Structures are given as structure tokens and as C-alpha cells.
Image (cartoon, rainbow, N blue to C red):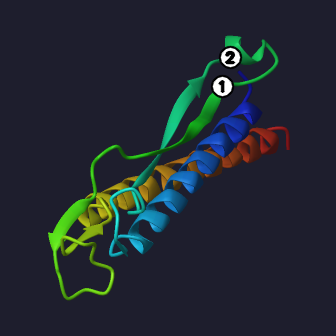
């Protein structure tokens, strides 16, 4: 594997973490959304990643990270008794999103650290290439 492949591999990691950060932002933005039915309540979304190995892409391509998809949580939305709420159903219940804000904040920190690690790998590789080129002087 050449040093230039590090840029492509790190690029796929940056892209994957960007998708993860967007999903987290969407979840946090909809954390307090109220609905009148459990089906209409916002459900947290999580991206799923897979590893791409060299052999899966052919001998000329490096590995990386592939985004398998973004999936909705199967956890039921929170049900709260609030008969005075304008969106309450006939029984007086409202349905809140199943987003756990604390969990999402921890995920956001993890995603941003992973993003920073990929950027650092790219910067280190760039410095190694520059130093290698300066050896011939």
C-alpha cells in the first residue's frame, strides 16, 4: 500500500463520520418533538458502517469505510399523559421522540474525535511525503 492510499482511506472515514454527525444533529434537533400517535413520533436514526477490504475493491483500490445505510431505532417513543396538550390523543397521551440526548452527545464527541483522528492521519501522511521528497535535496 502506498502512502497516497492513506488519503483515500482517511477520506472515506471522514465521509462516514460526516454522515454520523449529520444523523446526530438531526436526532438532537428532533429530541423534543411531540406527536399525537406513536407512528408519527420521531425515531432516532443511526448510520451503520462496514469495512471495505482491499480484496473486495480489487487489487488497485485501497480499503476504507462504507456507509451501509441509516436506520431508524425500533425503540418505542415515550408516552406521556398530558390531556391539556393540543396534540393529545383521545386518551390524553402525547408521544415524544425516543432520542436520548445524553447518548447523542456522547456519540457526537466520539464522532468528532474519529473525524479529528482521520484528519491527523492525513496530516501525518502529508508530512511524511514532504520529508521524503526533501531527502533528495
Given contact means CB atoms under 8 Å apart, are the residues at marks 2 and 1 in contact?
yes
Q: Indicate which disc, 2 or 1, sits on the residue closer to the N terminus.
A: 2
Query: Residue at 66% of width from left, 41% of height from top?
Result: 12
Position of residue 78 in the picture relative to residue 69 (left or right):
left
Q: Residue at x 44, y 61 (%)?
A: 24
Q: Residue 17 at what x, y percent from top left?
A: 54, 51
Residue 54 is marked as 2
Which of the two residues, 48 or 18, is positioned nearer the viewer here? 48
Q: Residue 127 at x, y = what percent?
A: 67, 49
Quadrant of res 67 = top right
Query: Can you identify the residue that label 1 sits on?
Result: 63
Residue visible at 39% across and 69% down? 28
User: Tag 1's secondary structure?
Assistant: loop
Residue at the spot x=76%, y=35% of the render? 4
Q: Is residue 69 above or below residue 14?
A: above
Residue 10 shows in this picture: yes
**Tag 2 secondary structure:** helix
Residue 58 falls in image quadrant: top right
Q: Is residue 128 visible?
A: no
Q: CA distance from mark 2 to mark 1?
A: 5 Å
- 100 and 123: which one is in front? 100
Instruction: Using the image as rendered, state which of residue 64 and residue 122 is in the foreground.
Output: 64
Residue 1 lies, in percent from the top left, at 71, 21
Image x and y of residue 56, in percent: 69, 14
Task: In the rendered view, tell whether residue 56 sits above or below residue 30.
Answer: above
Give the quadrant of the C terminus: top right
Which image quadrant is residue 53 in? top right
Few, some or many residues within 10 Å of mark 1 (<14, 14–19, 20+) = many
Amino acid at each position: 500500500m502506498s502512502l497516497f492510499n492513506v488519503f483515500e482511506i482517511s477520506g472515506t472515514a471522514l465521509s462516514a463520520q460526516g454522515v454520523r454527525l449529520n444523523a446526530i444533529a438531526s436526532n438532537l434537533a428532533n429530541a423534543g418533538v411531540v406527536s399525537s400517535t406513536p407512528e408519527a413520533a420521531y425515531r432516532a436514526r443511526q448510520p451503520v458502517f462496514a469495512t471495505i477490504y482491499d480484496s473486495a475493491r480489487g487489487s488497485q483500490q485501497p480499503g476504507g469505510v462504507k456507509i451501509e445505510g441509516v436506520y431508524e431505532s425500533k425503540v418505542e417513543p415515550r408516552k406521556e399523559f398530558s390531556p391539556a396538550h393540543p396534540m393529545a390523543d383521545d386518551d390524553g397521551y402525547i408521544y415524544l421522540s425516543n432520542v436520548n440526548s445524553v447518548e447523542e452527545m456522547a456519540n457526537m464527541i466520539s464522532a468528532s474525535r474519529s473525524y479529528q483522528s482521520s484528519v491527523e492521519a492525513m496530516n501525518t501522511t502529508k508530512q511524511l511525503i514532504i520529508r521524503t521528497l526533501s531527502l533528495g535535496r
